[in-house]
Image (cartoon, helix red, strand yellow):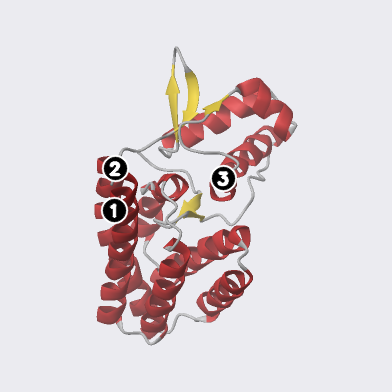
Amino acid sequence: MARTQTEQADPEATPDHGKDSGTHSSGARSASGTVFYGIMKGLDAQSFVPGQRLVEVDLAAQYGVSRNSVREALQRLAAEGVVELSRNKGAAIRSLSLQQTLEVLDVAERMTGLLAKSAAQGIADGHPPTNIEQALRELTQADQTHDTEAFAAARRSLYRALLEASGSQELRRLFPSIQMPIVYAQHRPATLQKVRMRDYQAMSDAILAGNAQAADKAGIAHVQNVRAAIVRKHEEASA
């Protein structure tokens, strides 16, 4: 099944390959895009949380759109695996068990390594590094100012830049399907942003050097570090 182009693409956040904010030729699609991206960004900002019910009339009022536009957005979010739709209970943000989280991370580990490797090959073949460098600067600034919303936006920009550098249509198609937005919304270890910033720097350094092997290892190591932080938090909470 072909997937929509979303802003999610990390496996961290999945990037909005179209680089838009839901604006399309028709007003109805633009309105549904407003809801779609609003909920995706709300996961980063913790204004939406896993397990939360999504009430159509409330969303329509919040975003100033029709209920038909809300339904379209919810269908799109369900196709991305972010929302679960139930005939009896309506819509809710998807919630993952620890085992499901680890399964998502297993997929993300392989895909992130592959993306980093492919992006490094693209840089070695002459793709301009400008967008990657700019996203890295934005990440660094957001990290230094402790601006979580800006950090999330910069993270999405970084993954968009990596997908562009890779030039792989299959990665563009598959990468947004990894459920990292739900993982990060549900599991927020205090050390996670520091882990990510350190890993993004290491991964970007290898990519910008055009070192595909080192980039692959750095991408895999990043997701392994995320997994370790989440498991450690779970163990501490269960102790």
Residue found at the very far top of the displayed protein: 88
Check disc 3 and report its element: helix, strand or loop: loop
Label 3: which residue?
46
Question: Can you give x and y, in whole percent of width and height, for residue 204 in the image?
Answer: 42, 78
Q: Is residue 201 above or below residue 111?
A: below
Q: Quadrant of the N terminus?
A: top left
Check if mark 1's residue and mark 2's residue have beta carbons within 8 Å.
yes
Question: Can you give x and y, in whole percent of width and height, for residue 147 in the image?
Answer: 63, 63
Residue 125 shows in this picture: no
Label 1: which residue?
231
Disc nearer the start of the sequence (3/1)? 3
Question: Can you give x and y, in whole percent of width and height, for residue 106 in the image?
Answer: 24, 53
Check if mark 3's residue and mark 1's residue have beta carbons within 8 Å.
no
Q: Looking at the picture, which amino acid does disc 3 mark?
A: Gln
Question: Can you give x and y, in whole percent of width and height, for residue 133 in the image?
Answer: 53, 80
Check if mark 3's residue and mark 2's residue have beta carbons within 8 Å.
no
**Image-quadrant location for residue 110:** bottom left
Q: Looking at the picture, which amino acid does disc 2 mark?
A: Leu
Residue at x 33% of width, y 78% of height: 121
Disc nearer the start of the sequence (3/2)? 3
**Camera-side residue: 216 or 120?**
216
Q: Is residue 177 above or below residue 87?
A: below
| Mark-to-mark CA distance, 1 and 2 | 8 Å
Label 2: which residue?
98
In the displayed structure image, the side of residue 125 where residue 154 appears, left or right: right
Check disc 2 and report its element: helix, strand or loop: helix
